[in-house]
Image (spheres, rainbow, N blue to C red):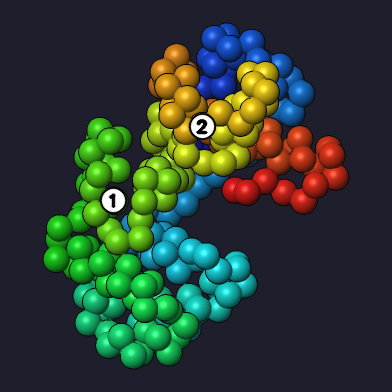
Amino acid sequence: MGLSAADLRRGLDALALVEPAFATGLATHGYPEPRTGMRGHVSLLRTIVGQQVSTASANAIYRRLEALIGAEMDPATLAATPDEALRAVGLSRQKISYVKSLAGLVADGELDLAALPADDEEAIAQLTRIKGIGRWSAEIYLLFAEGRPDVWPAGDLAVQIEIGHLLGHDERPAEKLVRSLSGRWSPYRGALAIFTWHHYGRRLSAKGADKAPI
């Protein structure tokens, strides 16, 4: 789902009127492409599998898990799968506990990913009940999978770096400051987050660096 190109353009145009630095950034690097994900437990499962491993390793583990459980990753089946079988596909003991936390909450109906609260903070609180899903992962899910327009992942390193760069800070601002500064950017903070990743990537590419963290 995620924010559409029209959503991003509308939000960033509004922000450019509020913050001249954002207007300059848009003029320099243009509008970002949409970033989307799929709603549901599979997206969160992929997030867990991908933690602290390379993309290639995560994909290989997920393929083996998919072969074991099935493409739909039925939560009840996953919750009932013996730990030994999950270890055999490459999941660590810790990740097995995370996977089973997600599967159990969904299978038991305690977490309904099709009907998360409309309030972003309440939705984040529900998602972070899953072991292994912290605030950043919950915010990214809400932004990419649900397209919530005002989600603001202030703890993201690239967001912090680029907000500091755009606003002319001498040092990377801490999460607390990035969050407090964002009040005037509501209700378009989701579009701004996507723009900071885009701007960061373009700026590094211009310097010959590889890529942005996200």
Residue in the picture at 56% in, 33% down? 160
Disc tally is 2
Q: In which quarter of the view is residue 69 placed? A: bottom left
Badge 1 amino acid? Leu
Badge 2 element: loop
Residue in the picture at 77% in, 51% down? 210
Instruction: Indicate the position of residue 180 as horizontal and vertical percent values.
Output: 42, 22
Q: CA distance from mark 2 to mark 1?
A: 24 Å
Residue in the picture at 20% in, 63% down? 105
Residue 66's disc number? none
Q: In which quarter of the view is residue 89 placed? A: bottom left
Earlier-in-chain disc, 2 versus 1: 1
> Callout 2: 10 Å neighbours few (<14), some, many (20+)?
some
Badge 1 element: helix
Task: List the single residue furthest toward the front.
Answer: 171
Residue in the picture at 61% in, 31% down? 172
Residue 202 appears in the rendering: yes
Instruction: Indicate the position of residue 192 as horizontal and vertical percent values.
Output: 54, 28
| Residue of label 1 | 127
- Residue 163 vs residue 125: left or right? right
Residue 40 lies, with reference to residue 11, above or below; the image says: below
**CB contact under 8 Å: marks 2 and 1:** no
| Residue of label 2 | 174
Badge 2 amino acid? Ala
- Residue 72 vs residue 185: left or right? left
Instruction: Indicate the position of residue 88 as horizontal and vertical percent values.
Output: 43, 90
- Residue 39 vs residue 18: left or right? left
- Residue 154 vs residue 103: left or right? right
**Closest to the observer: 26 or 89?**
89
Instruction: Indicate the position of residue 170 as horizontal and vertical percent values.
Output: 67, 23
